[in-house]
Image (cartoon, helix red, strand yellow):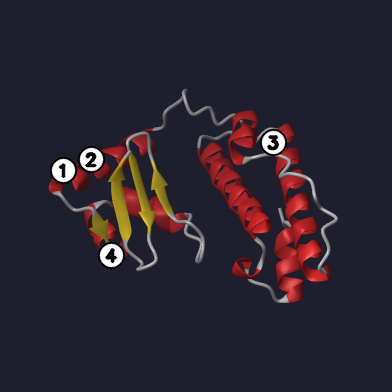
Amino acid sequence: MELQYVKALKEHGLKISDLPEDAQTGISEINKILKGFTMIERKGLKPTAASIKKLKTLDKWVYYEILDYLHDTDKNDDEMPVDADDVLDDAGLDKNQNVDQLGLQIESELDNLYASGKKSLTIDEIKSSAPKTYREIWENYEPGDENGIITSKYSFTENNNELFELKLK
């Protein structure tokens, strides 16, 4: 699925960092939804039609935010129409059911890292000490975006120095 906001960025030679905060937040929510859709598809399921419709609505909203930015207007004064959690709930990604094995394995790797006292790691260190975590981060990595993994126990996110910080929630 090609998103309208991606076309607009390419067409106008823009980077996400050029955009106003509302548009950046909307793009971040879209990326969360797309990552959730990937998780759903890995389970052999498909996102619901309603969740895809909500994704398209959010994409359209971000597109209008970009147009407002380009034309120095404020016609898109509505609030963001949906957030990632609502869409993913509709899509069938119930956070309380069907805990997948990969998630448990990643949390186990993070348990081991935390127990070892290693709280700040490079991507290469993650690759050697937590391969499943590394694979998940790498497959979903977006330059300039907030990258990492958040589990029920840990936040493992990239900082500005290209290090991943492991924190207990």
Amino acid bearing label 1: Ala
Contact? badges 2 and 4 (CB < 8 Å)? no
Q: Earlier in the sequence, mark 4 or mark 3?
A: 3
CA distance for labels 4 and 1: 19 Å
Which quadrant does the C terminus fall into?
top left
Q: Earlier in the sequence, mark 3 or mark 2?
A: 3
Label 4: which residue? 124
8 with respect to 134 (left or right): right
Contact? badges 1 and 2 (CB < 8 Å)? yes
Q: Which disc is residue 115 wearing? A: 1
Amino acid bearing label 2: Asp
Relative to 12, residue 7 above or below: above
Q: Earlier in the sequence, mark 4 or mark 1?
A: 1
Contact? badges 3 and 2 (CB < 8 Å)? no
Q: Crowding near pointer 3: few (<14 within 10 Å), some, many (20+)? A: many
70 with respect to 34 (left or right): right
Label 2: which residue? 111
Instruction: Tell me the mark number nearer the camera, choosing from 4 and 1.
Output: 1
Seen as rendered, the residue at the extreme left is 116
Instruction: Tell me the mark number nearer the camera, choosing from 2 and 4.
Output: 2
CA distance for labels 3 and 2: 33 Å
Contact? badges 4 and 1 (CB < 8 Å)? no
Name which residue lies at 50% across and 66% down: 143
Amino acid bearing label 3: Ser
Q: Position of residue 155 (x, y in %)?
A: 36, 45
